[in-house]
Image (cartoon, rainbow, N blue to C red):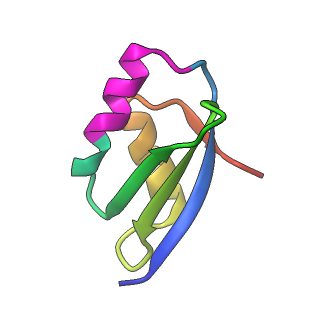
Amino acid sequence: MTKVLMHFVLTRPMDEDLMKCLASTHGLYGMTHVKLLPSMQEIAVEYDASRLTAEQVSAALLRAGIPAEPKA
């Protein structure tokens, strides 16, 4: 397993629906942790790079209802 930590910027403000989407990410294949950062505008995603690429992580977040873009 190759763990990678990647930061994403949320493209809309945090609300209750988005919190529910974040809570559901524990079941996403290859992702080990998704954590809301104290700024409430970013998330940190730890994933298994031997199973997923950065692009696949971004796509999985969008499918889960989390509007986020990789932090530059």
Closest to the observer, 27 or 36: 36
Q: Is residue 22 magenta?
A: yes
Q: Is residue 6 left or right of residue 48?
A: right
Image-quadrant location for residue 57: bottom left
The answer to whether any part of residue 64 appears in the image is no
Most extreme residue toward the left, as rendered? 27
Q: How far across and down, in percent of the image, does residue 20 sit?
A: 31, 25
- The structure residue drawn at horizontal position 42% and vertical position 50%, both measured from the top left corner, is 34
Q: Is residue 52 magenta?
A: no
In the displayed image of the protein, which residue is found farthest to the bottom? 1
Please say if 28 is above or below 53. above
Q: Say which of 40 and 17 sits in front.
A: 40
Q: Position of residue 56 (x, y in %)?
A: 45, 56
Vertical position of residue 58 compared to residue 66: above or below:
below
Residue 50: horizontal and vertical position, in percent? Answer: 39, 80
Q: Residue at x 47, y 15 (%)?
A: 15
Left or right: residue 64 compared with residue 55: left
Give the residue at x 39% y 15%: 16
Q: Position of residue 53 (x, y in %)?
A: 48, 67
| Residue with the most extreme front position | 38
Segment tinted magenta in the rendering: 14-24
Q: Is residue 26 visible?
A: yes
Residue drawn where x is 51% and y is 72% of the image: 4
> In this picture, is 50 found above or below 10?
below
Q: Answer with the quarter of the image where residue 47 lies.
A: bottom left
Quadrant for the N terminus in the image? bottom left
